[in-house]
Amino acid sequence: MQSSVLTLTLILGIMIWPARGNTAPTAQEIITLARQQLTVPAEFVLGEMKVYRGEKLNRFYSFVMGKLWEAETQTESVRLDFKTPVNSSVDSSLYSDQRYLLRRSPQAPATQWLYLPGLRRVRLIPHQPNDPLLQSDYLFYDLTTILDFGDYRYRLIDTNEQSPIIEGEPLDAAGPVPYEKAVFHLEKRGETYLVTEVQYSARGKEKHARFLAFDEIAPGCYRPQQLVVTGEGGRTEFSFHHWAFRAPEPRLLTPALLETRTLAFPATAP
């Protein structure tokens, strides 16, 4: 009798064990994987941004963007150097250099600086998460991609493990999140997940972001070649021509170098 009970217990254990191993991931586990593949110490990208109003091209910028992630302090720094036409003509051959630096951490409110080319000075400016970046459909808040993931409470809408859909609601209604809701469409790629689309809702308005044509820049780290953000009355198109991962060079992402040096690609410290 004891032998029969033991045999039955072993059979049940074998049947139950694989089922535990194949448990579908939760919304938070999927989001954690999507976030982890973004947390490289430093990366840079060379690209262009086009802002359309209706079907008319309204603004055009070329830019170099650098990101620095400090895992120990959970600090995310983003520097964006862009060329903007001197006059209102999109086809103008005269451009001025403008530089922007944002630093965000859980310990303190986000801080941002702007280089003023006319004065050749850097100014500390108020951080407004819901302000549009360069009059586009992309917000300043959207720049800190890694920390933004921690601003929401998540639940699964579509449990398809290969292409799940997850809804996020802000943890703190009075916090930095400019959206009332965000719906993330993800795609499983190897052992990780990529965010391919996000639908945002805020004050009765909708915004849609699509991340396209991912490349594997390093093992397990994917970056898009295009981003299209569609809002009311227009859209913003980003083209990311070259991504590069570099050893951390914190000096490049400081107010001092924001004033004295442009961000070249590939980026190197003096």
Image (tube, rainbow, N blue to C red):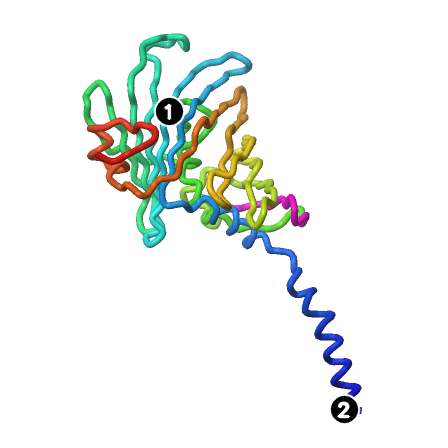
Residue reaching furthest bottom? 1
Residue 160 in the magenta stretch? The answer is yes
Q: Nearer the viewer, residue 67 or 59?
A: 67
Badge 2: residue crowd in 10 Å (few <14, some 14–19, many ≥20): few
User: Which quadrant is home to the N terminus?
Assistant: bottom right
- Give the alpha-carbon distance from disc 2 to disc 1, as whole Å: 74 Å
Horizontal arrangement in the rendering, residue 89 relative to residue 22 (left or right): left
**Which residue is tagged 2?**
2
Amino acid, disc 2: Gln
* Front label number (2 vs 1): 2
Is the residue 54 above or below the residue 220 in the image?
Answer: above
Where is residue 160? Give x, y as percent. 68, 48
**Which residue is tagged 1?**
63
Q: Residue 133: which quarter of the image?
A: top left
Amino acid, disc 1: Phe
Part of the protein shown in magenta: 159-169
Q: What secondary structure is found at the residue carrying circle 1?
A: strand
Q: What secondary structure is found at the residue carrying circle 2?
A: helix
